[in-house]
Amino acid sequence: MPRTSRHVIASSSVSTALVQAVALLAVGAIGSTALSATTDGGRQGVRPATVRLAQPAVDQLRDSRPMIMPRVPTPVATAKPPVASVVHAVAPPAHKARKRAHVARRWLPTGTGMWIYQWNKTNHGRPASIVKQARKVGLTTLYVRTGSTHDGFTGGPVLKALLPATAHTNVRVVAWDFPELKNPTRDAKRLVRAAKVTARHGLRVAAVAPDIETPSEGTHTSAARVAKYLKTLRRLLPKNVAILATVPWPSSVRRGHYPYATVARYSDALLPMAYWYNNKPQVVTANSIAYLRRFHKPVQPVGQGYDGKLDVPSLPHNNLRKQMPAFLRTARQLRVSAVSVWSWQSAPRVTWSALASAKRWFRR
């Protein structure tokens, strides 16, 4: 986030019929795999290759911010195999079934959200005022900074003040943290602390959103460090708390360098920071969604709700009156379930107006 606003059948005797049935099942499975491989690319919406993006220098000037695929059905075998074979071949192990059920219970955002970086500059840190404004424009998620490698865990007082203000509303709070990953285990434990803060009425955060940046922002983003961080986070977090990994948008400069696959493997959703600066917002947003959907995790983009000139003074001012609606329309057209915007304290009135107008566009 910008600094400025920041898954044998063994038998001693097998009849001929059983052998034939098993063979048919194997062929069917191979056929399904082949079909999936050949159709995978066609279900991602807008393909990154369809648009050639200008890669401005600002791609590398991001600040050091402490910021389904429908499966192809398996072809049915023409000969009905013995019932026992079917049961043993397709029934998943009990522990895997339990794990899938656990994941299904994790809350994921829907609707619109706003990121909070500087608490005291967010309606002067007044929880009731913050929740009132959020509800007025239809926000369903507040992403609140709870710490970083640089300043440690700072979210205790903020969460204990904000969470009670959301009681009996549809507004949920997500804790976000900026880890530099010099010590992945320590970074993970810090965000776990935020997830375990319990406020009045027994309220806790609904999810966590680690802001996993690039080396340009001082983050040690090797695949090994990222994996260690996210694995530790998953092990220590309450099982029903989702990990919403916040990642830089996958520009051509970052693909092949940033460990998107590793992040996706250990996360429940991907939140690309689709900051367009002097690109077209619909291009950055569409490319981010199309590229990240290959990892079969929900993609929920974060829009640039502030003037990019705050980050890069040499850039012209952003026309948010046109760019915010373009971002939101693109996300809607690509059927994402949630969007959010960076960030509360730097968002002008036109950003709030665009969010209010788009609140019915996303599942809630």
Image (cartoon, rainbow, N blue to C red):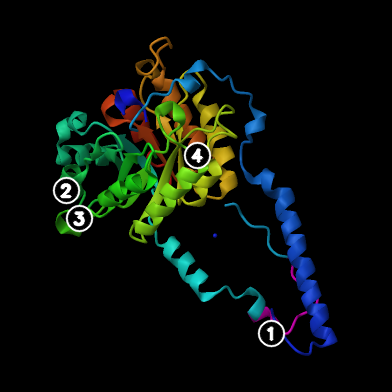
Q: Are marks 2 and 1 in contact (CB under 8 Å)?
A: no
- Quadrant holding the N terminus: top left
Q: Earlier in the sequence, mark 1 or mark 3?
A: 1
Foreground tag (4 vs 1): 4
Q: Are marks 3 and 4 in contact (CB under 8 Å)?
A: no
Q: Is residue 250 left or right of residue 172?
A: right
Q: Amino acid at mark 2?
A: Lys
Which residue position holds label 4? Answer: 222
Q: Amino acid at mark 4?
A: Ser
Crowd band around label 2 with a 10 angstrom C-alpha radius: few (<14), some (14–19), many (20+)? some
Which residue position holds label 3? Answer: 198
Q: Earlier in the sequence, mark 2 or mark 4?
A: 2
Give the Cα distance between marks 3 and 2. Answer: 7 Å
Residue located 16% across and 40% down the image? 127
Residue 72: % across, % down: 68, 58
- The answer to whether residue 135 is magenta is no
Foreground tag (2 vs 4): 4
Please identify the quarter of the rendering in which residue 71 is found. bottom right
Which residue position holds label 1? Answer: 83
